[in-house]
Amino acid sequence: MICQCQRCARCVYSICADICLISLQMDMLWNWDVKDRCIVFSSWQISSAISAIFSIITIILLGVLFEWLKYRMRKLDTSIANSLAIAYNIHTSYKNSNNLNRSAVDIEVDEPTTVQTPAKLIVPKHQQVQRSILYAASAALSFFLMLIFMTYNGFLIAAVVVGAGLGHYTFHREIEVAPSNESSSALGCHL
């Protein structure tokens, strides 16, 4: 049956039976409305307080999942780098050992001396496939969270931020004190 709703410019999706039951909206202005909202897909609807709470919890978990993916990518890269260093007999050591009694703030990290420093090493295919899958999943989730952010809904934006913050707190508790040649991979604004 075709819905005979009067659709305005703000109406994104209509659920139809014999009559139009509800019109869902997606605003392009900052808002705090949660009832009768559509999030990214027409099938993801907020029509009650329960669905709003479920959606906010889901978005928080997606933010945590994104941070876990970043953590997993970093751990995989470290594991691959370590295995390649062993395979190619690459050793890194630090010259200055008199920093043992100094606090972390006072320590000046010296440049590492290496026995052998190849310019770049090729990652084996099966490990590169793993890296690529994690990266693709991270990029997709990043853009999905961006689309949620672009609903301009204060509650949904807060859920993305809380999820990212909880995930960062949970999975990024270590900090590297040695100098790193890694550049921050930035795809969009969230990777």
Image (spheres, helix red, strand yellow):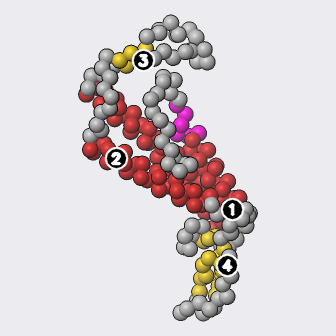
Number of residues whose C-alpha sits closer than 10 Å to that of mark 2, classed few (under 14), some (14–19) or many (20 or more): some
Which marked residue is nearer to the observer: mark 1 or mark 3?
A: 3
Q: Position of residue 31 (x, y in %)?
A: 73, 64
| Disc 2/disc 3 C-alpha distance (Å) | 29 Å
Q: Earlier in the sequence, mark 1 or mark 3?
A: 3
Q: Earlier in the sequence, mark 2 or mark 3?
A: 3
Q: Based on the displayed image, in which of its 4 quarters is residue 56 positioned?
A: bottom right
Q: Position of residue 25 (x, y in %)?
A: 66, 74
Number of residues whose C-alpha sits closer than 10 Å to that of mark 4, classed few (under 14), some (14–19) or many (20 or more): few
Residue identifier under label 3: 112
Q: Earlier in the sequence, mark 2 or mark 4?
A: 4
Instruction: Using the image, tell me which numbered label, if any, was put on residue 130.
Output: 2
Q: Is residue 166 above or below residue 101?
A: below
Q: Earlier in the sequence, mark 4 or mark 1?
A: 4
Q: Position of residue 152 (x, y in %)?
A: 68, 61
Residue positioned 47% across, 46% down in the render: 69
Q: In the rendered structure, does residue 172 fall within the stretch colored magenta?
A: yes
Which marked residue is nearer to the observer: mark 2 or mark 3?
A: 3
Q: Is residue 102 above or below residue 177?
A: above
- Mark 4 lies on a secondary structure that is loop
Q: Earlier in the sequence, mark 2 or mark 1?
A: 2
Instruction: Using the image, tell me which numbered label, if any, was put on residue 153.
Output: 1
Q: In the rendered structure, does residue 171 fall within the stretch colored magenta?
A: yes
Q: Based on the displayed image, in which of its 4 quarters is residue 121 positioned?
A: top left
Amino acid residing under circle 2: Gln
Which marked residue is nearer to the observer: mark 4 or mark 1?
A: 4
- Mark 1 lies on a secondary structure that is loop
| Disc 1/disc 3 C-alpha distance (Å) | 48 Å
